[in-house]
Image (tube, grey):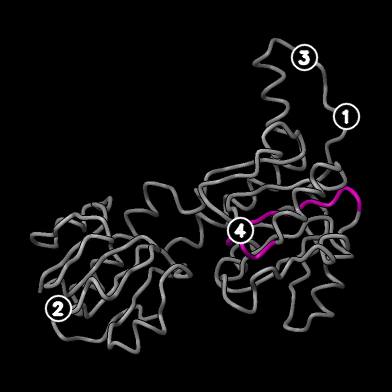
Amino acid sequence: MKVRATRKLPGSAWAELDQVEITPADVPGPDVEILVVVNEPVDLTLYPSLRLIANYSVGYDRIDVPAATARGVAVSNTPGVLDAATADLAMALMLAARRGLVAGDRIVREGGWAGLRDGREVSGATLGIVGLGRIGSAVARRAAGFDMRILPVRRSEGDLEAVLRDCDIVTLHVPLMAETRGLISRERLALLKDGATLVNTARGGVVDEEALVAELVSGRITAGLDVFAHEPHVPHELFDLPNVVLTPHIASDTIETRAAMTRVVVDNVLAFSRGEPLPNPV
């Protein structure tokens, strides 16, 4: 089977695939049967022979899965192997946002030594986890070590709104789909108590970004954000704010996790090539 990838993936497992063509996804591939992408849109009309999209990401919101299914194209992803790295970053963003680590670092680098007076505790805080799947559960385990009171969000809207009102910190761990787009709306952001912290390592589109920017500019809340609605664009209003910590979608970006994700992609490609069931079908 002819395999194309939009980029070479890290880790030793990549060498197990023979003669992989590295080409952007928007270049026609009439004889390509397996396409490896990094949660990128795929124009299926460019790939009439395509049989598998192997996605190097747990999220697949930029891949039209129903269209692929209608054309008989399978889709796989990489769940499970990035839970720890993402949970670690969520905790790091909580700590950084609550304790003013970025502002403190900037003070020292600029030759100052003024203490910060508005840090807030993480230990003992009430943590709302929106999405208690694998990653959310990993966050909960870490939060227990900080003696945090954990409030998972159930499925009802009333439960979500009650958690938003009650929590010191809210962390988001839901996939981006029709029912979660804009889930944290302007009205729901307004429910957060003064001084609360919002952490997002899920997808930017889960939050009403314009409303979040307005809340952060007002200084009423703090945030740790790894994802944004229109990546790589980040709202310029956030750049100079001391109450928000910004990272460039690096939740799974560790050497160990990236190699493990490649292992999963390769396993799916090899299984498909052998006519075996996909280990990780979407």
Which residue in the structure is indicated by mark 3?
Answer: 113
Camera-near label (4 vs 3) is: 4
Label 1 secondary element: loop
User: Which residue has dot 1 on it?
Assistant: 117
Numbered tag placed on residue 88 in the rendering:
none
Q: Amino acid at mark 1?
A: Arg
Which residue is depicted at the point 23% across and 52% down? 8
Q: Which label's residue is closer to the chain start, 2 or 1?
A: 1
Identify the element where label 2 is drawn: helix
Q: CA distance from mark 2 to mark 3?
A: 60 Å
Horizontal and vertical percent position of residue 135: 56, 66
Can you say whether 76 is above or below 3 in the image?
below
Disc 3 marks which amino acid? Trp
Mark 3 surroundings: few (<14), some (14-19) or many (≥20) residues within 10 A: few
The Cα–Cα distance between marks 4 and 3, rounded to whole angstroms, is: 35 Å
Closer to viewer: mark 4 or mark 1: 4
Q: Is residue 179 above or below residue 16?
A: below
Q: Which of 210 and 266 lies nearest the eye of the viewer?
A: 210
Q: On the image, which quarter does residue 14 sit in? A: bottom left
Q: Nearer the viewer, mark 4 or mark 2?
A: 4
Q: Residue at x 36, y 81 (%)?
A: 281
- Identify the residue position indicated by label 2 in the image: 273
Q: Residue at 78% across / 51% down in the picture? A: 197
Label 4 is placed on what type of residue?
Gly
Q: State the image coordinates of residue 198 (x, y, percent, origin top left).
A: 74, 54
Specify start and end residues of the magenta stretch as a single range. Answer: 194-207
